[in-house]
Image (cartoon, rainbow, N blue to C red):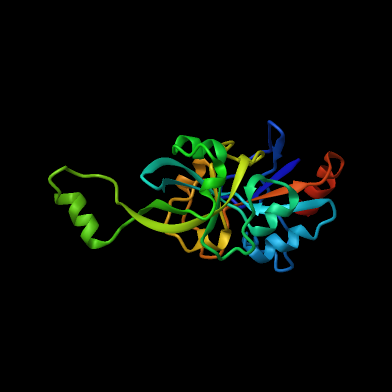
Amino acid sequence: NYITVSVRNTDMRRSRGGEGRGVWANPPVASQSGQTPVLDEQLRKEIEQISGVEAVFPEMQFPAQIKLGNQQQFTLVQALSADGFKSGLVQLREGQPYKTDDVNELIISDMFLRRLGVTRPGAAIGQQVEIRTLSFDFSVTNLLRMAFGSRGPGLPLSNTTYAFTAVGVAERIGMRGGSLPVSSDVIIPTGAAGRMQKLELTSIWDFFQPGEKNGTYSTLSVKVDSPAHVGSVEEKLRA
């Protein structure tokens, strides 16, 4: 039972699908000033205090290349707060979840490990994993390279590599109920994700929206403890 909360310039309707249900609220929570609140960490914690809410986590996903040893694969990385593991969103078969949101540690799925040639999931615990991200680069140097490069014009993209340590292996990773119903093979803390240069992707609409301010989220997913409480939680979010 999930509710997806987002502040968009475009009025989105409620969507249902799979095990979750999405509610696009504009604004998601009332404010005394009458202004639309931003989806930040403070608001996430306020929503967690609503009766019937089990967990609140940002729907922050981004494409990246993952390298373990000599093997590398392209996948989607999901950002999840350390508190998110307390609600059972991710089941681990090896290792343990990261304890804080600021460490460069990650959880990786056993299926993705097999794609990287690792047959014993426990062998990945403690190993260094490189995450190589893409981001827009509008620097003068890059724009000149695009305009006058020998390969012709291209996208203003750059890449950055970050070092993480694998601390847990998940049986199955997949956040249901979001606006983009995909599974992520790698999960990292929200704080670590916030420091990374990356292309965030929560839905196709993100390509047409202005960049988010630092410390804010484009989407929050709310896990409700029972289907019977979904309606009351929705009402409080829309109040």
Q: Position of residue 26 (x, y in %)?
A: 66, 51
Q: Position of residue 70 (x, y in %)?
A: 36, 45
* 77 in relation to 197, above or below: above
Q: Nearer the viewer, residue 226 or 9?
A: 226
Residue that sits furthest to the top in the current view: 18
**What residue is rendered at 30% in x and 58% in y?**
138
Q: What quarter of the picture does the C terminus occupy?
A: bottom right
Q: What quarter of the picture does the N terminus occupy?
A: top right
**What residue is rendered at 37% in x and 56% in y?**
161
Q: Position of residue 155 (x, y in %)?
A: 29, 46
Q: Nearer the viewer, residue 106 or 61?
A: 106
Q: Nearer the viewer, residue 134 or 21?
A: 134
**What residue is rendered at 87% in x and 40% in y?**
228
Q: Image quarter for residue 71? A: top left
Residue that sits furthest to the bottom in the current view: 33
Q: Position of residue 69 (x, y in %)?
A: 39, 47
